[in-house]
Image (spheres, helix red, strand yellow):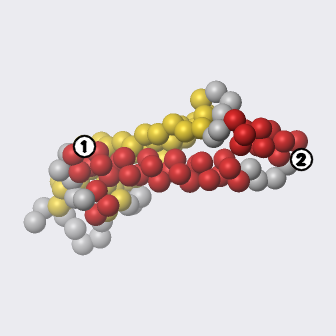
Amino acid sequence: MSDKILVVTTESIPGREYEVIGEVFGLTTQSKNVIKNIGASLKNIVGGEIKAYTEMMAESRDTAIDRLRDNAVSMGADAVVMMRFDSGSIGQDMQSVAAYGTAVRYIK
């Protein structure tokens, strides 16, 4: 059901009237395993993209959006407007991602 929740970064949904329900969040904190951390440390010496961390960030983003949608469904929402991301590091090898926005219900 939550995959049917429209999530937009815009302030409004063209052609739809809605009422605001409230704020919604999707949070995740992830890390890579020790082997990938060692590989990332070696890559850091020579420079360039660290693909394991890029993949981790993509996974984190997708998980955060899925959890945002689940939160919206639990509140009876039809959509989420003004969705944004925030991220930060926790320690040396953990990354936290938050997706947040405003849950809305369509006025029929």
Q: Position of residue 46 (x, y in %)?
A: 89, 47
Residue annotated with mark 2: 46
Q: Is residue 13 visible?
A: yes
Q: Position of residue 84 (x, y in %)?
A: 45, 49
Helix, strand or loop at label 1? It is strand
Q: Position of residue 63 (x, y in %)?
A: 45, 49
Q: Position of residue 58 (x, y in %)?
A: 56, 54
Label whose residue precedes the other's in the sequence (2 or 1):
1
Residue annotated with mark 1: 22
Please say if 77 is above or below 92: below
Question: Which residue corresponds to the image point at 22% horizontal and 68% vertical from the top-left?
Answer: 16
Q: Is residue 101 visible?
A: no
In this rendering, would 20 be left or right of 26? left
Question: Which residue corresponds to the image point at 76% horizontal and 43% vertical from the top-left?
Answer: 40
Q: Nearer the viewer, residue 12 or 73?
A: 73
Question: Which residue corresponds to the image point at 51% horizontal and 37% vertical from the top-left?
Answer: 29
Helix, strand or loop at label 2? It is helix
Between marks 2 and 1 in the image, the one whose residue lies nearer the viewer: 2
In this rendering, would 41 be left or right of 16? right
Q: Nearer the viewer, residue 65 or 39?
A: 39
Please say if 85 is above or below 13: above
As drawn, which residue projects farthest toward the front?
35
Question: Which residue corresponds to the image point at 88% horizontal and 42% vertical from the top-left?
Answer: 45
Q: Nearer the viewer, residue 107 or 36?
A: 36
Crowd rating for badge 2 (residues with CA inside 10 Å; few <14, some 14–19, many 20+):
few
Figure label count: 2
